[in-house]
Image: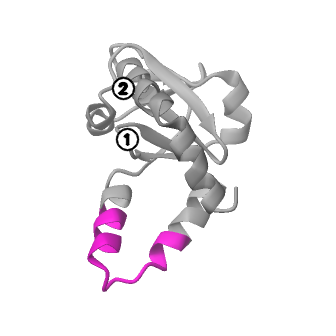
């Protein structure tokens, strides 16, 4: 990421991402990037959550309040707003991962810590996935 908060999205992600797309706060101190079609699907699911649930209201606020519609410049860069850079602690080195219907943006440091932490519990996580039918 450059000093102006611009990040080059690798060309292999650009076609699937489309333009415009939505960038928002993600979980685990990363950012989520959604193609517009996927964002609309997720938006409908979140709108259907019960307003009487305190946790549902909190999650929807967290998720939507950080969302911003973005476009790529002619060099394939996205300008990441300062509040989102702060959330994900993005500075110079950024890890970009494709996660099915979205892209995740991580600071290199947070990604390395996350991978180290989850590597130790990978088998436990796999057992949980089996319980979910995967």
Q: Position of residue 48 (x, y in %)?
A: 49, 80
Q: To which residue does mark 2 refer?
A: 110
Q: Quadrant of residue 15?
A: top right
Q: Is residue 53 magenta?
A: yes
Q: Is residue 51 left or right of residue 18?
A: left
Q: Are marks 1 and 2 in contact (CB under 8 Å)?
A: yes
The residue tagged with tag 1: helix, strand or loop? loop
Q: Is residue 8 above or below residue 61?
A: above
Q: Which residue occupies 56% across, 57% down? A: 39
Q: Which residue occupies 69% across, 62% down? A: 133
Q: Residues within 10 Å of mark 2 (few under 14, many from 20)?
A: some
Residue in front for this viewpoint, 17 or 31: 31
Mark linked to residue 56: none
Q: To which residue does mark 1 refer?
A: 28
Magenta span of residues? 45-61
Look at the image and tell me in which quarter the N terminus lies.
Answer: top left
Q: Is residue 115 magenta?
A: no
């Amino acid at each position: 990421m450059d000093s102006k908060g611009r990040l080059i999205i690798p060309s292999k992600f650009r076609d699937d991402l489309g333009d415009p797309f939505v960038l928002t706060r993600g979980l685990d101190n990363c950012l989520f990037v959604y193609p517009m079609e996927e964002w609309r699907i997720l938006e409908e699911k979140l709108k259907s959550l019960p307003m009487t649930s305190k946790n549902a209201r909190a999650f929807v606020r967290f998720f939507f309040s950080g969302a911003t519609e973005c476009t790529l410049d002619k060099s394939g860069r996205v300008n990441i707003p300062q509040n989102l850079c702060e959330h994900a602690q993005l500075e110079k080195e950024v890890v970009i991962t494709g996660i099915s219907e979205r892209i995740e943006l991580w600071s290199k440091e947070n990604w390395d810590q996350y991978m180290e932490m989850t590597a130790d519990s990978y088998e436990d996580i796999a057992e949980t996935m089996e319980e979910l039918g995967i």
